[in-house]
Image (spheres, rainbow, N blue to C red):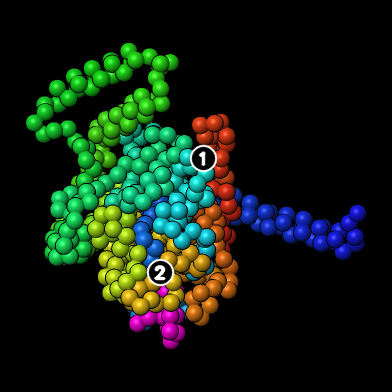
């Protein structure tokens, strides 16, 4: 039998929980009403930093401490918000940024960490969980616009854990459309430093979706005849006899044909932009990817992801050695491209409808090793949110003076991903059914109220 003190605590806990949930439902409903009232579709841009970027050299510097390194802090447009001196363009957009300095996971392995932060699920489970960007793309995809993909992944670094980037049990119809780099340095070919076509240089990186258009020497009439024949063969192969591979094959081909016939094809053609605009994003593959992301959003694609690598399948943020020159270089590429993307989205009236998420799979150790590098550190790291639905100028969480511990408001991956869902107007607890008929939430976590802006005209 409960004692008087235990009963009192129980009642207090129930009332406290009720008040918390009531507050959650209030601002969630308010944000949903804001989005519905505008009639504007939301978009999500993910800036993926494979390898685990150093939080102490980007968003959470420790000046004056032995762990701090040589970089200086830069004052931003938000009083009290300071970050790396190598991010000056983004400092001018700080009033649209929300920095989370207290991310924490238990996964310090690249493959496992990538799976966790992208799916919101612990690795090693038998269920084929979808990447959250794929689930969001499914919810935001314009069902009335044939050929518009729900999720486009530019320069995806899938080699460590492909399942962290796919649609899982959502099926082939929700798989991302991938964009790769053309020419030297693409498709995993090795290059020397001065041949690296993804670095900022005078040489412009070129991106493409392979086989997006029919061969130029194939007359349109012949292409149409081939399509009719393919449809006839597919229809004669009755659905009751189709296994899963056949359904996937059919889905992929139909998506490809719809895309090839749609106006979205033009969004992938960066040559439609002026030389001045292209160079303003930087000549790197990441810079050109950010420009393509802006174009795709203008054409109605709901979810676009761009990865920052100096070479394909190279975890350049994995700075076990030469951390500081590498992070300086990467920060320059990031700052130029992301800063210009923010400017373009703002000038075109798209920022108020577009949420941005910057993150990697974990952070780096506060201690600097003997090779001038930082090692894997999932205990306390940073990510950044921006744009629509986000409380600009916010800083959430705090780490100790040495950077080793979180001393205020630890944030879990499900909380972060649920916040992203809510920012784009999606209920993170919306359920999809897996192959076994089991209903599963998009994200099993609560959004963070302090990071959400329900007053913005979204």
| Position of the N terminus by quadrant | bottom right
Q: Is residue 248 above or below residue 22?
A: above
* Nearer-the-camera pick, 225 or 41: 225
Residue 301's disc number: none
Q: In this view, does 320 lie above or below 119?
A: below
Residue at 33% x, 28% y is: 249
Residue 248 in the image: state x and y as whole percent.
37, 29
Kindly state the secondary structure of the residue where label 1 is placed. Answer: loop
Judged left or right of residue 407, residue 292 is left
| Res 321 → quadrant | bottom left
Residue at 24% x, 40% y is: 265
Judged left or right of residue 35, residue 2 is right
Kindly state the secondary structure of the residue where label 2 is placed. Answer: loop
Considering every residue shown, the one lying at the far front of the view is 370
Q: Is residue 175 above or below residue 52?
A: above
Residue at 42% x, 40% y is: 167
Residue at mark 1: 126
Residue 412 seen in the current view: yes
Residue at mark 2: 375
Residue 179 in the image: state x and y as whole percent.
26, 46
Residue range in magenta is 56-70
């Amino acid at each position: 039998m409960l004692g008087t003190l235990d009963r009192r605590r129980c009642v207090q806990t129930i009332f406290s929980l009720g008040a918390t949930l009531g507050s959650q439902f209030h601002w969630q409903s308010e944000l949903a009403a804001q989005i519905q009232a505008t009639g504007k579709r939301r978009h999500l841009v993910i800036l993926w930093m494979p390898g685990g970027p150093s939080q102490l050299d980007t968003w959470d510097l420790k000046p004056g401490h032995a762990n701090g390194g040589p970089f200086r802090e830069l004052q931003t447009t938000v009083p009290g918000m300071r970050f790396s001196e190598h991010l000056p363009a983004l400092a001018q957009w700080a009033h649209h940024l929300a920095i989370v300095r207290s991310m924490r996971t238990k996964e310090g392995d690249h493959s496992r960490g990538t799976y966790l932060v992208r799916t919101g699920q612990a690795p090693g489970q038998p269920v084929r969980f979808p990447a959250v960007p794929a689930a969001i793309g499914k919810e935001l995809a314009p069902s009335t616009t044939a050929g518009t993909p729900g999720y486009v992944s530019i320069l995806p670094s899938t080699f460590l854990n492909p399942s962290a980037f796919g649609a899982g049990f959502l099926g082939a119809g929700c798989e991302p459309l991938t964009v790769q780099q053309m020419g030297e340095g693409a498709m995993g070919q090795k290059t020397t430093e001065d041949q690296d076509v993804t670095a900022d240089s005078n040489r412009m990186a070129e991106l493409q979706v392979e086989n997006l258009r029919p061969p130029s020497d194939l007359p349109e009439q012949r292409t149409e005849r081939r399509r009719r024949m393919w449809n006839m063969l597919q229809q004669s192969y009755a659905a009751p006899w189709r296994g899963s591979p056949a359904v996937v094959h059919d889905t992929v081909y139909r998506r490809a044909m719809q895309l090839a016939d749609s106006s979205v094809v033009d969004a992938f053609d960066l040559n439609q932009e002026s030389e001045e605009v292209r160079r303003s994003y930087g000549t790197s593959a990441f810079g050109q990817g950010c420009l393509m992301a802006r174009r795709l959003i203008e054409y109605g694609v709901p979810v676009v992801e761009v990865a920052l690598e100096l070479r394909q399948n190279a975890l350049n943020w994995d700075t076990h050695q030469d951390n500081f020159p590498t992070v300086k270089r990467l920060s320059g590429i990031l700052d130029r491209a992301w800063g210009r993307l923010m400017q373009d989205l703002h000038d075109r009236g798209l920022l108020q409808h577009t949420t941005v998420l910057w993150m990697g799979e974990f952070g780096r150790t506060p201690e600097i090793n003997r090779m001038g590098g930082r090692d894997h550190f999932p205990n306390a790291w940073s990510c950044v949110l921006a744009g629509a639905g986000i409380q600009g100028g916010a800083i959430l969480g705090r780490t100790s003076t040495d950077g080793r511990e979180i001393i205020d408001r630890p944030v879990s991956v499900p909380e972060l991903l649920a916040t992203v869902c809510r920012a784009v107007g999606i209920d993170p607890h919306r359920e999809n059914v897996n192959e076994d008929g089991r209903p599963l939430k998009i994200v099993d976590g609560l959004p963070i109220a302090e990071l959400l802006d329900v007053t913005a005209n979204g």
